[in-house]
Image (cartoon, grey):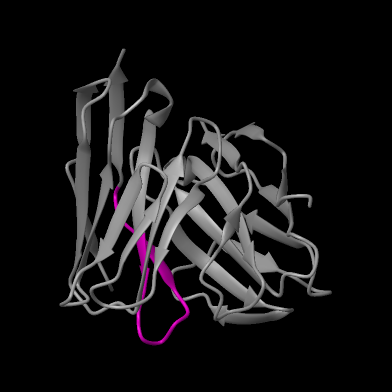
Amino acid sequence: EAGVAQSPRYKIIEKRQSVAFWCNPISGHATLYWYQQILGQGPKLLIQFQNNGVVDDSQLPKDRFSAERLKGVDSTLKIQPAKLEDSAVYLCASSPDTGSTEAFFGQGTRLTVV
Amino acid sequence: GQQLNQSPQSMFIQEGEDVSMNCTSSSIFNTWLWYKQDPGEGPVLLIALYKAGELTSNGRLTAQFGITRKDSFLNISASIPSDVGIYFCAGRDNAGNMLTFGGGTRLMVKP
């Protein structure tokens, strides 16, 4: 079974630029999560989708971050404009549904803002 | 918001030693999870706990769901070099949606 796919693996941008990350969850998984992991910290949930609807985006900085999952399958996370403090690994995870315990993570996208 | 305090932040042990780490929460959780993260990879689930007092093993790993539902611990017995990595606890509250992570315990094993 293929795992959660993310791209790109690495991205370096200048502050105030825009960036987008892509995630393809495990086939059939209804729930998709985006996490931000700052170096030395645990992952922090940014947004959770159930199919193409948002379940929780309370920790998403909506002035600069946006995410969509239009067809309920793959998802994109965008930052516009980026700040230095956005440097982190952005992890995508999926699970069969909202009540499922297991969330399976992708390898993440390491973003460096200079 | 919810906070998970994980300790210790790091451990440096000799191969063959046992390891214990724990996690405490400011609120009640109904699910506790333990993950391991290797460099450059996403977290991988090790053990899931669903009931207060539950004790679950996975090979050399044993984890327990505290009876107060506000804490959990993970033990690793007879550590080996490949146990090196960062271990995270995570929990779900009664609402069942958000998965909150602790700050991680970095484990280093000396051969």
Q: State whether residue B92 is above or below residue A23.
A: below
Residue occupying image coordinates x 63% and y 75%: A49
Q: Tell me: A34 left or right of A29.
A: left
- Given residues A111 and A27, the one toward you in this image is A27
Residue B18: % across, % down: 21, 34
Residue A43: % across, % down: 43, 53
**What stretch of residues is rendered in magenta?**
B90-103
Q: Tell me: A40 left or right of A106.
A: left
Residue at the bottom extreme?
Answer: B95
Residue occupying image coordinates x 21% and y 77%: B27
Q: State whether residue B35 is above or below residue B100.
A: above
Residue occupying image coordinates x 29% and y 31%: B107
Q: Name the image quarter holding residue B92.
A: bottom left
Q: Tell me: A56 left or right of A8.
A: left
Let me know if residue B94 is in the magenta part.
yes
Residue A59: % across, % down: 43, 69
Determine if residue B107 is in view: yes
